[in-house]
Amino acid sequence: MERHEKRLTSMIWRSMGESMGLSLVLFGVILYFLSSNGYIKAFTTWQEGVRVSLTLIVIVAFIGGVYGLWHSSKMKRRLELLREVMLTLEKGNLSRTVPPIGEDEIGQLGEQLNFITKKWEDQVTSLQRLSSNNAQLAQKAKYSAIVEERQRLARELHDAVSQQLFAISMTATAVGRTLDKDFDKAQRQIQLIEEMASVAQSEMRALLLHLRPVHLEGKRLSEGLVELLQELTAKVPMAIDWELIEDVQLPKGIEDHLFRIVQEAMSNALRHSKATKLEVRLTQPSEDAVRLLIRDNGVGFDLDDKKHASYGIVTMRERVNEIGGSINLITAPGKGTRIDIRVPIMAKGGDGDGERNPDQGAACG
């Protein structure tokens, strides 16, 4: 910003100098023409000639400088406007356009920038529509996967838990027969029942863990993130703070990608960062954009070190690009990690509110 201001200031001074120089040259040419044709009388004394000449030079230079200042200030305002629009485009905000600023080269540049913005907006809209279509296709593929998963769980229930329960039942019957005859044997059988019940309970917990939904299914993004963060809070010794806007309307494709990004960021924080604090923010700074901020106080890493170009970070960048957003990753050794994602909202509602199969949340896809 400071360098930009210096350049604009230098441009103003240069324009003023050029205008003053051109004014003096034109003044000299006009004066020579008038003198050559006898329109100017000779001065009575050389002192009078010097005084009048200096006065005229100062007046002409002042007028040229004022004109140069006015012209360069006008150009500065137009260039500043172009720069502001370009900065908003860089941040992913496609709603701002360049108003008419003239018909010269700068005005044509503004029109070209508006054309590029419109083209970019159309491409982002297409990307988001494609992302939503891909999510719907993936959703249909999950239905068949759910059927296969249920069949697998049924086999495991029969092979593991059912057999354990049958063994417990048979042993309990045996306890009733031997309790009066051999008390020590009955105690061993009861201990065996406890062990088998514990094994059966462990098997059931493992199966229930598979039944728990791990996808953003049947929920809005904020609801899925709250459930995910609450579950993580209960399981890990980490202080987790979140602020999630609830009424934001997002296409399903964007919701799925942002949910996966949060999952990946949390996984990285648990596996690599050694963080004790994690912060997740989902906000809507404007009507046509959403912002996701994930920050931890972990060990961080060097972005230029290729060893840390993990698959998770690459995947996050690919997901953000697929929905037409921008990602800003800030980290350094010992400074934690900050992931700032901004996504323009080109399509309202619609795709994010489609009907979902109620069986969809019953099993892991």
Image (tube, rainbow, N blue to C red):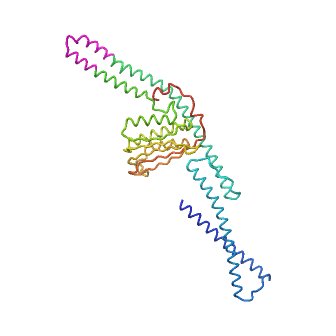
Magenta residues (range): 166-193
Q: Measured from the top left, where is residue 110 in percent x and y?
A: 66, 54
Q: Measured from the top left, where is residue 245 in percent x and y?
A: 52, 39
63 is within the stretch colored magenta: no
Residue at the far bottom: name it.
Answer: 45
Q: Measured from the top left, where is residue 316 in percent x and y?
A: 48, 42
On screen, residue 42 versus residue 89, left or right, reads: right
Q: Is residue 260 above or below residue 161?
A: below
Specify the quadrant that holds the N terminus.
bottom right
* Residue sitting at x 38%, y 19%: 158
* Residue sitting at x 67%, y 52%: 99
Q: Is residue 186 above or below residue 44?
A: above
Name the chief secondary structure element in magenta.
helix
On screen, residue 277 versus residue 62, left or right, reads: left
Q: Nearer the viewer, residue 319 or 177?
A: 177
Residue at the far right: name it.
Answer: 38
Q: Measured from the top left, where is residue 337 in percent x and y?
A: 43, 47
Q: Is residue 324 above or below residue 52?
A: above
Q: Nearer the viewer, residue 290 or 199?
A: 290
* Residue sitting at x 55%, y 31%: 137
Q: Is residue 238 above or below residue 32?
A: above
In the rendered picture of this protein, how many numbered marks are placed on residues?
Answer: 0
